[in-house]
Image (tube, rainbow, N blue to C red):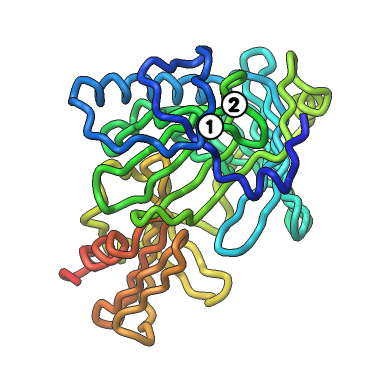
Amino acid sequence: MMFPWLVLAAVTATTVPANQGVTPGSQPQAESAQALPQHNPSSQDAEQNQAQALQWLDALSHALTNDDYVLSLVKVQEGRVQPFRYEHGVIDGEQIEHLVFLNGPPREVVRKGDVVTLLDMDHAPFSYKADSIRGPIPDALLTAPADLVDHYNLVLAGVSRVAGHPAQLLRIVPKDNYRHGFWIWIDRDNHLPLRVDRVAQNAEVIEQLMVVDMDKLDAPSDHIQRVAKAQFPAPSALPSQGSPQALGKVNWLPPGFHPVTANYHRLALLGEGVDYWLYSDGLAEIAVYINPSAPRQELTIHQNGFFNLVGINHGGTEVMAVGTVPTAALERVARQVSLTGGQP
């Protein structure tokens, strides 16, 4: 089914008042152009709403990881547009994913079970162990939506129309100032995502992921079946990486962020070795770099809404915190890194 691009690009979803009884598979309320009512629900109402919102997230996660489908997506970020083609299937209980970047040099990512393979024209195919391709859809929406409730409020906001399709609008609202929120429109029929907005604290949309073509299948596509049979390199350690050199220690992170990877590698642009840590709460990511080379400035802040950077000079050693969180959180992370031989 094709979604008209102009309609989808311009859509500001018409929302009806939140329905406390809406659950996956139920009928939507009549469409209304009125904004959501502004009220202060009782704690019991809020708990019921969050429970129903979690049901929708569970339905989304189940559809994304268990169904067979093909999505064409467009990500709009910092004035740039990146189109993708994403196919998913399940064969003999094993998930098969294929993500293709449609702009720029040819680049693809394939996952078969717990093995991810990177394919691009400038390097030989390379495989490594992972349970996610870390694609445009946040990991927490794929695997662990229930884990979000510790640090986000889930709000079932109402029924909308997105590109002519009835969609359940769900808001993921951070409980602190260390991360951004999300607005998700979920197809009411098949529970796949229609649109995902990353929203700043001032309600500005800083990243938007839109589905422009969707094909829900009854069985894995012929392409996915070919991918499942294809031979890829055996998984190995990521190239040009080693263990961190103990240049420092990350002492503070926003609640809920857990380590994803840590290594020592050379930055291609600078030709310098850095210690590197990556953390995530499932929706947002924070990367920390420690570079023993002296930086040019005492404090560097680069802020563009979605992807922010804070660099701090700790006595000749540069600590950079980079991530999809507000700069205030990154600055606190960077300032509380302790270096080998003493505090920063």
**Residue positioned 48% across, 74% down in the render:** 272
The number of numbered discs placed on residues in the rendered structure image is 2
Placement of 134 over or under 320, stated as above or below: above
CB within 8 Å, label 2 to label 1: yes
Q: Nearer the viewer, residue 87 or 74?
A: 74
* For marks 2 and 1 on the same chain, the one whose residue lies earlier in the sequence: 1
Q: Amino acid at mark 2?
A: Pro
Q: Residue 233: in sight, yes or no? A: no
Residue 246 sits in quarter: bottom left
Q: Tell me: 68 left or right of 308.
A: right
**Residue positioned 57% across, 58% down in the render:** 77
Q: Residue 287: in sight, yes or no? A: yes
Q: Tell me: 204 left or right of 318.
A: right
Q: Tell me: 254 left or right of 160.
A: left
Q: Secondary structure at mark 1?
A: strand
Q: Amino acid at mark 1?
A: Ser
Residue 166 shows which numbered tag? Answer: 2
Q: Nearer the viewer, residue 156 or 58?
A: 156
**Residue positioned 35% across, 70% down in the render:** 310
Residue 146 shows which numbered tag? Answer: none
Q: Secondary structure at mark 2?
A: strand
Q: Determine which residue is flagged by label 1.
A: 160
Residue 72, given in percent of the width and then of the height, sits at 72, 39
Q: Tell me: 256 left or right of 344.
A: right
